[in-house]
Structures are given as C-alpha cells and as structure tokens.
Amino acid sequence: MHEHAYGPSESGSVVLDLGGDTGALIVYTGRDLHGREIEISRGDDRRVHSAVRGRRVRDGSFHNAVYPDLPAGIYTVWWDESTPAEGVSVHGGGIAEFMWPSSGFGVAC
C-alpha cells in the first residue's frame, strides 16, 4: 500500500476512453482513504493501483480511485497486499462501480 498527498481534482478532470472491449472501474471510498493507493488485478495479471482522490462536483465532493482503459473482465479489488475483496465485472463501453465499506463515504459539502 502506498499513500500520496494529492489535492482534490476538479470536475471533469478524468478522461475515460470507453468502447469496444475497453471499460473503466471507479472505487468509491470515504475521505479517510484519501491518498491511499488501492490495487486491482484481473485473473493472474499483475496488479495495478490508483490513488484515492477527492473529486469536486457541483454539490460538494467525494473520494474515489479511478481505473480508466481496462480490458473487459473480472477484476479483484484488494483490501491490502494479501486480502482480496470481491470480483467486479468490467464491461467494454461501460463503467463498473465498487463501494469500499467505509464510515466516511458520502458527499461532503
């Protein structure tokens, strides 16, 4: 697990290239995970990670990790280096979502 001190991103700052066999995954978390890198993997593929960042939207902000440009398939979200959560299905042309159980999840104004 890695942690970084990223500031919040602005609305519309993430570009997703969706279509064909390419999709995306968004892992929603609470504010308490800000800066933490969450790993995912597909089958026996190597793990990739994305940092949890605050995202500003019209009505406030929320925290998530975004995984753009993923080949379609079943991905495992990892709680830590050795504990898998559950599989998430990413479909080409779509955005899959995963809610990280956290007491701080929700929109904060």
Image (cartoon, rainbow, N blue to C red):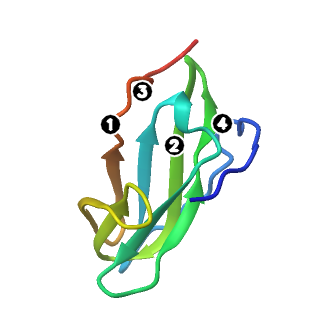
Does the residue at mark 2 contact the one at mark 1 (Cβ under 8 Å)? Answer: no
* Quarter of the image where one finds residue 88: bottom left
Circle 3 SS class: loop
Give the amino acid at mark 1.
Pro
Sequence-wise, the earlier of marks 3 and 4 is 4
How many other residues sit within 10 Å of disc 4, few (<14), some (14-19) or many (≥20)? Answer: few
How many other residues sit within 10 Å of disc 2, few (<14), some (14-19) or many (≥20)? Answer: many
Q: Nearer the viewer, residue 19 or 48?
A: 48
Give the amino acid at mark 3.
Phe
Question: Can residue 17 be seen by looking at this rendering?
Answer: no
Sequence-wise, the earlier of marks 3 and 2 is 2
Q: CA distance from mark 1 to mark 3?
A: 8 Å
Whether residue 17 sits left or right of residue 76 in the image: it is right
Does the residue at mark 4 contact the one at mark 2 (Cβ under 8 Å)? Answer: no
Does the residue at mark 1 contact the one at mark 3 (Cβ under 8 Å)? Answer: no
Sequence-wise, the earlier of marks 2 and 1 is 2
How many other residues sit within 10 Å of disc 1, few (<14), some (14-19) or many (≥20)? Answer: few
Estimate the x, y position of residue 72 in percent, counting from the top left: 32, 77
Q: CA distance from mark 4 to mark 2?
A: 13 Å
> At 37% from the left edge and 67% from the top edge, which residue is drawn?
82
Read off the residue under disc 3: 105
Read off the residue under disc 4: 11
Read off the residue under disc 1: 101
Whether residue 99 sits left or right of residue 67 in the image: it is left
Q: Quadrant of the N terminus?
A: bottom right
Q: Nearer the viewer, mark 4 or mark 2?
A: 2
Q: Nearer the viewer, mark 3 or mark 4?
A: 3
Read off the residue under disc 2: 64
> At 52% from the left edge and 54% from the top edge, which residue is drawn?
66
Give the amino acid at mark 4.
Ser
Q: CA distance from mark 4 to mark 1?
A: 24 Å
Q: CA distance from mark 3 to mark 2?
A: 10 Å
